[in-house]
Amino acid sequence: MKNDILLELQHLYKEFDKKYKNDSNELRPILGGGKFHNPKFLFLFINPTHLNISSSKHYKGKRRYPFIGVRYFWRLLSQAGFIDKTIVNDIYKYGWQIEDEIRIEKSLSKHRIYITNLVKATQKGPENPSKNLIQRDFSLLEKEIDIVSPKYIVVFGILVFKALTGKEIKLQRCLNDIKIRKYKPYKSKQILGKEYNVLPCYFPIGRGSPKKALRILSYINQTYGK
């Protein structure tokens, strides 16, 4: 099955690049990718940082995915059943190769996943993006979500959850709900006239909680991935 990038999405990616072309930040923005239209899940992270090797202006591959160069993230996705384990095993064995992005894209498409960030601009440090930066990018994110049209949006961290729903949440409650099998989607704010099913999750690396994220992602895959 073909996984072509829709023309509207190609234009939007160019809009992302144009928006940051004159920024003082030399790190390039990270776009989005995976299954480009009607995925089961859209994985929404906070923002790329300098640890993503594809943000370098010298990088020759694509700039579609978060955590390129961060092997543990991809291993966690494979453990939750969202990406093929053979790809991750090769990354650990041979290190990152540009060709791995093509393999990752095919695997994400097969598992019906699209990945992107709340904020596209690459940060120089680990701090969260400001409210102003989130607001500045949000209209582009709305266009992206509308074009991609996912069934579920998995949001990583309370900041992303609030940006998409306008609500506060305690992620420990999600784990408690999983134990009693009452974990259910929340409704997003109106996004270009539509509401989306939002599934909250812990941030999977760094300042988040990888073990708790894995538990939630595994449950999401088992319950909503069919």
Image (cartoon, rainbow, N blue to C red):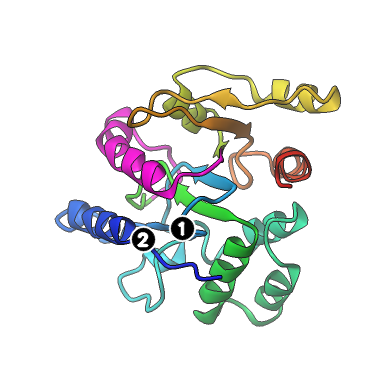
Q: Which residue is mark 1?
A: 36
Kind of residue sitting beneath label 2 = Leu
Seen at 29% across and 42% down, the residue is 140
Q: Residue furthest right?
A: 180
Q: Which residue is mark 2?
A: 6
- Comparing 123 with 204, the one in front is 204
Answer above or below: position of 126 versus 54: above
Q: Position of residue 159 (x, y in %)?
A: 48, 29
Range of the magenta residues? 125-152
- Comparing 63 with 93, the one in front is 63
Callouts 2 and 1 close, C-beta under 8 Å:
yes
- Density class for disc 2 (Cα within 10 Å; few <14, some 14-19, many ≥20) is few
Is-magenta flag for residue 215?
Answer: no
- Comparing 6 with 128, the one in front is 6
In the rendered image, which quarter is residue 53 located in?
A: bottom left
Answer yes or no: is residue 24 visible: no
Main SS category, magenta section: helix
Tell me if 224 is positioned left or right of 135 in this view.
right
